[in-house]
Image: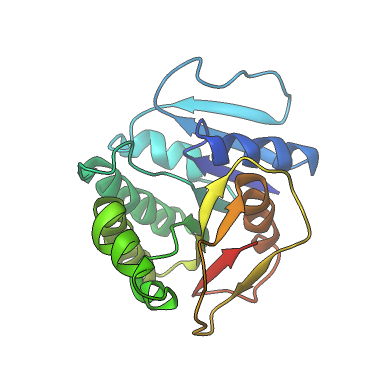
């Protein structure tokens, strides 16, 4: 399987690369800066480019089986319009090259998942602490859902640096989450890779936590 990872040099993205290579997948890492990822594996190809370079995006995506985005802004106080436009460009390039499978890592609190949180946690997380990044995720989710792609939106809880475990809870039903739900990045990466060959959450947004 050949996959393209956007956000590959981030904490979750780097784990995606490691786990995908362990499965003998062919991985294309699309990054902004040269040298941000060590190119030390025969199944790993690195393409350096910005998300507004549509020719490079097309070159990275064409012929792939799936694309994965773990892109996210670096600030909780400033919007990231370049990432919102970048997702738009990725979606358009995928549609143009007929690469259908797209998995987008969002966050619990985006879209209708905010109602999974009890008050006052919902107000603190959605309306205060993560208001800015969630606004970008909301726009991206809406664009992806309106696309012609076979998409899955993964909404993990708070990310930690723990290991891969079997203790995962996920679904699309409306359940009330109590407490501060979290999940390791390694578990998120593992779950995302599982979606490449599992259609259970095709064209759905799935919540995920430990």
Q: Position of residue 87 (x, y in %)?
A: 34, 51
Q: Nearer the viewer, residue 158 or 55?
A: 158
Q: Is residue 18 above or below residue 93?
A: above
Q: Residue at x 65, y 73 (%)?
A: 199
Q: Is residue 85 above or below residue 18?
A: below
Residue 141 vs residue 183: left or right? left
Q: Residue at x 60, y 54 (%)?
A: 183
Q: Position of residue 34 (x, y in %)?
A: 46, 16
How many marks overall?
0
Q: Position of residue 45 (x, y in %)?
A: 60, 28
Q: Is residue 98 above or below residue 174?
A: above
Residue 40 vs residue 120: left or right? right
Q: Is residue 99 visible?
A: no
Q: Position of residue 29 (x, y in %)?
A: 54, 33
What colouring does the structure picture have? rainbow
Q: Nearer the viewer, residue 61 or 86?
A: 86
Q: Is residue 14 above or below residue 79?
A: above
Which corner quadrant holds the C terminus? bottom right
Q: Residue at x 31, y 45 (%)?
A: 86
Residue 177 vs residue 71: left or right? right
Q: Nearer the viewer, residue 120 or 132?
A: 120
Q: Residue furthest bottom?
A: 174
Q: Residue at x 66, y 45 (%)?
A: 186
Q: Is residue 95 visible?
A: yes
User: Which quadrant would residue 166 be assigned to in this image?
Assistant: bottom right
Q: Nearer the viewer, residue 166 or 143?
A: 166
């Amino acid at each position: 399987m050949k996959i393209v990872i956007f956000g590959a040099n981030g904490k979750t993205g780097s784990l995606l690369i490691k786990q995908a290579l362990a499965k003998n997948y062919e991985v294309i890492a699309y990054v902004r800066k040269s040298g941000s990822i060590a190119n030390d594996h025969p199944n790993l190809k690195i393409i350096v480019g910005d998300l507004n370079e549509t020719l490079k995006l097309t070159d990275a995506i064409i012929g792939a089986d799936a694309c994965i985005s773990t892109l996210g802004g670096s600030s909780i106080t400033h919007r990231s319009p370049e990432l919102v436009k970048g997702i738009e460009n990725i979606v358009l390039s995928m549609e143009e090259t007929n690469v259908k499978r797209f998995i987008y890592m969002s966050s619990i609190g985006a879209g209708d998942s905010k109602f999974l949180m009890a008050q006052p946690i919902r107000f603190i997380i959605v309306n205060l602490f993560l208001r800015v990044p969630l606004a970008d995720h909301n726009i991206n989710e809406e664009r992806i859902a309106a696309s012609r792609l076979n998409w899955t939106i993964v909404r993990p809880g708070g990310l930690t640096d723990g290991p891969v475990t079997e203790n995962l809870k996920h679904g699309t039903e409306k359940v009330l989450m109590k407490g501060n739900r979290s999940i390791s990045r390694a578990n998120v990466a593992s779950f995302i890779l599982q979606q490449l060959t599992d259609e259970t959450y095709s064209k759905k947004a799935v919540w995920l936590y430990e």
